[in-house]
Structure formats: structure tokens, C-alpha cells
Image: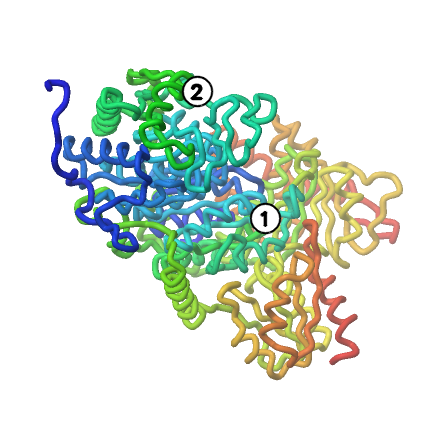
Amino acid sequence: MNDYEVIHEKSPTFYGHFERKGELQQQTHYCPGCGHGVAHKLIAESLAELGLQDRAILVSPVGCSVFAYYYFDVGNVQVAHGRAPAAATALKRAHPDSIVMSYQGDGDLAAIGTAEIVHAANRGENICVFFINNAVYGMTGGQMAPTSLMGQVSTTSPFGRSASNEGLPLHVCELLASLATPTYIERVALNDMKNIMKAKKAVKKALQTQKDGGGFSLVELLSPCPTIMKMDPIVARKWVGETLVKAFPLGVYRDHKPDLPPNPKVPHKTVAEALEVEVGVTDVPPTRRHHTRDLTVKIAGFGGQGILLMGQLLAEMGLREHMEVSWLPSYGPEMRSGSAHCHVTLGHERIGTPLISQPEVLVAMNELSLHKFAPSVASGGLILYNHTQLPEGFSAPQARVVCVPASEIADKLGSAKVANVVMLAALLEETECLPSETAMAVLEATVKNPKFLELDRQALKAGCDYVDTQVEVGAVSQPDGYSY
Amino acid sequence: MRQLCKGNIAIVKAAVLAGCRAYYGYPITPASEIAEYASLLLPEVGGTFLQAESEVSAINMVYGAASAGVRVMSASSGPGLSLMQEGISYIAGAELPCVIVDVVRGGPGLGNIAPEQSDYFCIVKGGGHGCYRNIVLAPASVQEMFDLTVLAFELADRYRNPVMIMTDGNVGQMMEPLTIEMRDIKAPEKPWAVTGTAESRKNLITSIYLEPDVLEAHIHKLEAKYQLAQELETRCENYLTDDADVLLVGFGIVSRVLRTSVDQLRAQGLKAGLLRPITLWPFPARELRETAQHVKTVMVVELNTGMMVEDVRLSLNGTVPVEFYGRAGGNVPMAEEITAQVFARMSTVV
């Protein structure tokens, strides 16, 4: 009599009476001889013994135990088929002090929910999973389960489970034990008192593990389903003890806390810091506004030429000058094929479309972009081309074309990377849409490395100087006769 | 203080301000940026970010976090949203609040990653099973990406219902000025949540009601909620509609193109106006009827083959002719294209 004690009352973790239909307020909806009742009892008693009832959250599955919340006087969340480990993950992370249990059958856990259980285990979620394996689908009326035995006849394997058609029974404990992260995995059986006592110990140990912050636990309970297996309760239990345990060996598959590398450090920020909002700083319109001008710009070239960044700098400048701005990048497969472009709109009124069909300014950083986009430039518009001269035969009679060898100038400055800044300066000088000191202010706020900032300063000056001096001598003729 | 901000980033910043401290998602172009930025910001402010094993898991993690009473969100695009539909149905059925962003891409199937508005049916009409509705917000600027995300969390809690933000790659990728007004946003008390405490022990989150009468009563309860949302939460914006002969209707990025088109049409002597639904559900039917009373024709423009136009036609019920112009496959029409379409179609009507 030392091995067990006789309990004469219902666990306090169970409700006194069950909110279910009909007259059966004292009974469960489970069939006589079903393993669920026993499994429920082991969990309820363990929770009570560990003093965890108030902290407990039971995530119930789809299957016969969908109504587990009829019985457990704990926090209850009923979830979609197979997804209990996902929901349990988020519940536990929201409330780390809660004790979260996922209760799942074999169809739920080992078929439709295979991804969820494997990944919850692999993350080492600090939850308990109670896995009821009765080798058959109960609630839906006896279809084949992923854990059905070879040759087992079910309503969807009428000739018996075949290896070539349905594969072999899935061994969940063995599968999860191949992962490094779980802490405790054991398979038990609900076939006789001795094994039920072992099962109780396993259930309690899983809960204790979570209580201690120990990590992921799974207890697989081999369980009788007399109704579906068309056996009386005694025979069903015997079948579990004699047949099911042979296919699914009992035992402990994992019992140690994983040795995991330390977590990387995450900096702590206030909400304002995270949102990049300077508290107490409000936008005051400048007492003296710089001259600014509405403009639509398309910037195009190769990826890596700083096309998108140049557009962002322009937009950022407009923002500083209290303009309305929009910046829209080309996105999609085009980016991967090596070309990039963006649209920038600077305005004084609310901006309608950010997609520019007829830009007032085209910045063509390569020949491809020049040919592709020059025809779309608005009448009376401007084209800035990154070269000393236009390609032979090129013509854009509706626009003024200015060649600025930005890449060449940048190379001379020591870094091809600042070609975009050279071109930005040329754009500002040509259009007078924004003051060049704003460009420097934006660069100072953006570029942290003093060496690069100095390069940018030189690039701005060089671009500006080139337009002021060289363009006139290096004049570019257009077929319509335009020239400097 | 104004900052230059990308649409997708504005969503995450708004979520942080709104007190969202849980993000569960799965990468997909063109929505990945939201997940990436959430993975940076949420841990920094003490929240949880987890990249799930699939959208199916992600939405069920959202279900779990919402059950636990925390403000939670996810974001995805077309194919990911298709996978999430079962979960969204459960969330609506269990009356859980959450915010889900769909940065719509081209479909069907793998389609492409360019902007479309072809998830209208799946998002607005509810792609999952059962009698439920999503509240759907359609931002058209970076500022609205922010403001409507904050609103989404408020509406989600007020109605205990999923709130969707339906946007596209253009609005998501666009950078515009963003003004953030710092304020302390507190989520309402959630006495129904399951939190693992003595006080919440009696709470149950479920969507199963086996008895037909009980389920019907539950559905009627949801429906009453949706009626209330229709009454109180419908939002739209009108531009130059008072004297309009031609009313353009479009949402999201299209509404921005249409705004320019309205200016172009007026410059060419045609009195055009724009009605831009901000809530796609509840749909601004009454506002549309009122606005359309004096117009001669309505033209709906969408990045699909004609989805919202069904709601426009239902709302107007044959009182005004409704034209449709759609582009798909990731093509976004330029303003000039719309303007030409209006002239081509309206010359006989107006």
C-alpha cells in the first residue's frame, strides 16, 4: 500500500459540476474506458499538488478533448486543429508566470500540427505538452491516425494501414528527442494501475519542469479508445498494454536541461527613442524660408550607384525646408537585375500621385537610363547625364540636357561612391529647387564617419563648381540647336 | 517633429506607440520589412518578436497572444494571408482583438511581388469560413500608415475583432514626412483575457458552440457588433466633390493617382472629384450615395479586375452609371492614363 494512495474525492482543479448539456452534469462526455478521463485526472491532481491551479492555462485542441474546458477549473483557451503549441507559445510569452499546457491528440499533434509541435520543441518553449496517442481519430469517427499501427483497419484504411500508402507510425517522442532543445520527454501508458502511477509522475514532473523555468516538456500518454476500436474497456486497456506499447516503447527519451548558448544582448530603449522622436522638439516654421521650388525628379541608374540614397537625400532636404515630399523607389525584380530608379516629388501642397510619369528632371546615371527615360521627361524639363558627352544619335528635343561626369569627378575625389552627391549638387545648382547648405546639413545628420563626410563636402562643391564653370565650356549641343 | 519615414516602417512605429508588444509573423515580399523592423523595435521596448515556422503558426500565435490580453499584430502578403484565413476566422469567432497587415502583391498563386489590390475579396469580404467581418483600413500615405495603425489597435479592442490594414508595395515602400505625436496610449482593461492568474481563472476563449441555438445567438451578437461598427466607424475622404460631374472612386495608392487625375481633369475643364474610402469595411455606402447624388457618372479605379466596384454598384443601386478601369499584374496606372480613360468614357455621358 506504500506505492499509492486512494483518493476519494474529485480533484479541486476540476469543476464541481460540468457545464454541459443534458442531465450529465457530474459526468464527463468521454466514453467508458476512454483514456482522456484518466489523463485529465492526472493533470488535475498534479496541478493541485503543485499549487498551480490559479496560474494554469489549458490550451485545448480539436478532437474529443475539445471540451476539456468543461472540466478544468483553470484558464482555458480552445484553439484550431493542430495549432495548440503555437497558441501556447504566445500565451506563455505574454505571461511568463503562467503555467501553459497544450493538450493534444495524435491527429492534432502528429498530423496536422506536426510543424507547430516540432518548432515549439525546437524553440524550447517553456510549456508542457500532453500528447494523447490512441492510434486512431476518435471524434471524427475512427479514421486512420499518423500513429495507427501497421495493418490497422480504420474507416480510411479499410484494408489496413500500408507502409507504401500511408507510411509507418510516427514516433513523436523519438522525433523530438533528436532535437537538442527539449528538456523532458517521456512516453507512458494508461493501461494498468502501475503504468498510470508512472504516468502521474511524468505529468507532475513536466509541470514541475515548467514551474522551475526548465523548458519544453512532452509526455506522450498511450491511451485506450474502446468505442472506436470496438473493444470493451478492459480489452482496450489490454490492447494498449500488449500491442500499442510494442510499437511505441515506453520510457524517458530526454531528461536534462539543454546546454544552450547565451542570448544576445538587446539594447533597452524608451518608446520615444525607438520611434526616433525627440521629445520636446516641435516643428517651428523657419523665420526666414530658403527659396524652394516644386519639382518632380526621376533618378535612374545601376544598383550600387546610390540612386535610391540620392533621392532620399533630396526628399530629406525638402523635409528640412518644410516642403511636402514623397520618395518612391522602383521595387521588384528590376532591382535584382541591376538597375534602380526612384521618384522624388517636392511640393508646397499636398502631393497627389508619388508616381511620376513626366518628370521635370531626369537624373540619368547611366546610358541605359538615359535612353529609357529621356522620352518621358516633361517639355521644358532638364536631363542630367552622368558623362562628359551624350551618346551618338541621342536626342531629347523637349528637354535641356546637361552632361555632368559625376562618376569621373567622384573618382578624382577618391571614391566613386560620391558620384551621387556630385550629381545632387549639380541638380541643386541647375534647378535651384533647394539651397545647397541644406544638402550639407542633411549629410551632416546622415553621415557619421568624418572621413566620408569630408568627401561628401568636396563632392557637393565639385558638382556645384562643375555646373558653374565647366558646363559652359563643355557645352552639349542638342539637335534642336540648343547649346550653352 | 516631422521625420522622413517609409510606409512599412511607419506601421511598426505606430504599433509600438499603440502599445503593441507582440509580433508574430513570417517573411514574404513585399511585407518582410514590417517583420524586420518589428524584430528590431519590439525587443528594444520589451516586447516579443517571433518569426514563426509558417503563416499558419504565426496567426495562431496571434490568437494565443490576443487570448492573453496583449496588443498583438502580424503582417503578410497575399499567399500568407490565404494561409492565415482559418486563424482569422477563429480570432473573429472567439472575439479576439488583433491587427493584421496585408501588403498586397500580385496574384493569383505566386503571382508577383508588385502592387495589386486583388486581395479585396479575401480581406474585405472575409476569406475565412463563417459569418464574420474584418474591419479593413486602407491607408494612402505614410502618415496614414501610422495613424490608421494606431486606430486599428483601438478598433480591434473596442470591437474585439480582427482589424486588417490593406495596403500595397507602393505605399509600403514610399517615404514621406511623418509626424508622431508622442502620447501615452493605454489598451483598455481586458477582464475576459486568460492571463494565468486567480482573477482570470474562470475565463474561457473559444469559438465552438455545438448547439445550433447557442451558435446562432453568438452569430447574432457578432452581427450586432458589426452593425454598430457600420454606424460608427465608416470613414472616407472627399476631394472636390461638391460640384463634380464625374466622381472617381479608389483607395490606397490608386486614390493618390486619382487625386492628381482630378486636378488634370479640372485643368482641362471637366469637373471631377474623388471619393476615397478609408474603411473598406465598413464600406462608406451612405457617404458614396450622398456624394453621388449630383454627379453624372462614377468611375471606379482599382489594381484588380473589378472588386470594390461591386460594393460601389451595390451602394448606388443603379442610380448612377458606374464605369470601371482596372490594372493588374503589378501595373499601376499613371494619372495621365486615368485622365485619358475618363475622357474616353465620359465624353458620351457628361
| Mark 2 surroundings within 10 Å by alpha-carbon count, few (fewer than 14), some (14 through 19), many (20 or more) | few
Q: Nearer the viewer, mark 1 or mark 2?
A: 2
Position of the N terminus of chain A, as image quadrant, is top left
Q: Residue at x 65, y 47 (%)?
A: B107
The answer for how far apart the CA atoms under marks 1 and 2 are is 41 Å
**Number of disc labels:** 2
Q: Residue at x 53, y 47 (%)?
A: B81
Query: What amino acid type should be assigned to the residue bearing mark 2?
Result: Leu
Same chain under badges 1 and 2? The reply is: no
Give B68 or A287, whichever is nearer the viewer: B68
Side of A8 relative to A184 (left or right): left
Q: Residue at x 31, y 34 (%)?
A: A33
Query: What amino acid type should be assigned to the residue bearing mark 1?
Result: Gly
Residue A367 percent across, percent down from the top left = 78, 38
What SS does tag 2 mark? helix
Q: How is the image coloured?
A: rainbow
Determine which residue is flagged by label 1.
B169
Determine which residue is flagged by label 2.
A175
Side of B18 relative to B109 (left or right): left
Contact between labelled residues 2 and 1, with CB atoms less than 8 Å apart: no
Q: State whether residue A286 is above or below residue A206.
A: below
Residue B83 percent across, percent down from the top left = 53, 43
Q: Is residue A21 visible?
A: yes
What SS does tag 1 mark? helix
Pointer 1 indicates a residue of which chain? B
Side of B167 relative to A216 (left or right): right
Pointer 2 indicates a residue of which chain? A
